[in-house]
Image (spheres, rainbow, N blue to C red):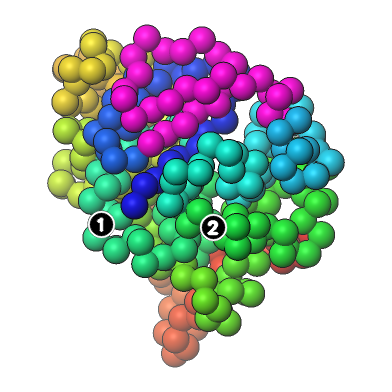
Amino acid sequence: MSIALLLPYYGKFPIWINAFLRSCACNPNITWIIFSDLKKPSYIPENVQFTFLRKTDLSALIQKKTGLEHTLSNPHKLCDFKPLYGTIFEDYLISYDYWGHCDMDIIWGDLESFLQSISWNNYDIISARKWAISGHFTLYRNLPSINNLFRNVVNYQKAFTDESYQGFDEGYFSYFLFQKIYLKQKDIKIYWPMRNSIDRAELFLHPKGWYWQAGKIYNKYRKGGIYIHLIDWKRTFEQVCMGQPENQDFFKINQYGIWDQDIPIEVQLKLILTSGFRRRLMRRLRSTKRMLKTRLTGNRKAPTIKANVPQGYEVL
């Protein structure tokens, strides 16, 4: 079985690009294909392919493969197209059994071991989010019936004509899969029973940081995930000190950057000043949530499984 993760990227590469690429290298049986018009980084692992593609050429490719009237003037707009990548980039996927989409604000952990643990070749779709499609990592079996599922979303064309991000990937498409396929137990098999990534909540719970070592991610309690999503921390990143990325087997990650040696004293002080408040705040929020849930429901009703998307994504 072979896997390709597709990532169109425009603008400029982030300061953690070498950490991203080094973490890709530690999953050698997975291929990343990055489409961009940027100059290639000096460090490129063997399992990462950079394909030159201007945004105008990508727009023409979308039109050719999907027939969609669309706009790509907003960089965030590309996220709407993620469930369509299997159709848009089908010519690059001929030799792959699975394809997926991901983001670059990610440091990968042991993705291969996770996939083996769930017998991934038994599923048609695998998401890192619970009861929803994850924009930062989802896999799809490379079959026309799976690649064209997006066409079954009623009025799907409307999501691509507005220049602003419409939430088609994690919103409308997630709701469609959950309501039309998962609940009705169609032949398509989806794995999404739990969140497997280190995301926003985990970042705030462990503000002093995480560790990447030889392809694995963990915190001081030795707990981890299949990858860390830098969704909020990327806004506060100040430094990335890694040396030669191809030789790196260990580095530390926190909200201010990445270090392969000791974290600077001034950064440690900032972490001490911010971590205590956030920890107390999160503890209070969790306590309040449990109290309100108990008062409102009395814990009498069994939890109802529903799509993990906000209201408003039911119909386009």
Q: In the shown orientation, is residue 16 left or right of residue 304?
A: left
Q: 47 or 161, which lies in front?
A: 47
The location of residue 284, given as percent across then percent down, is 38, 55
Among the 4 quarters of the image, the one containing residue 248: top left
Q: In the shown orientation, is residue 83 left or right of residue 219?
A: right
Identified by mark 1, the residue type is Gln
For the C terminus, the quadrant is bottom right
Residue at the spot 53% in from the left edge and 81% down from the top edge? 185
In the rendered image, residue 236 lying in the magenta stretch gets the answer no
The vertical placement of 238 against 143, above or below, is above
Q: 204 or 116, which lies in front?
A: 116
Q: Is residue 248 visible?
A: yes
Residue at the spot 27% in from the left edge and 53% down from the top edge? 114
The residue identified by callout 2 is: 143
The residue identified by callout 1 is: 116
Residue at the spot 42% in from the left edge and 13% down from the top edge? 41
Q: What stretch is highlighted in magenta?
A: 31-59
Q: 112 or 239, which lies in front?
A: 112
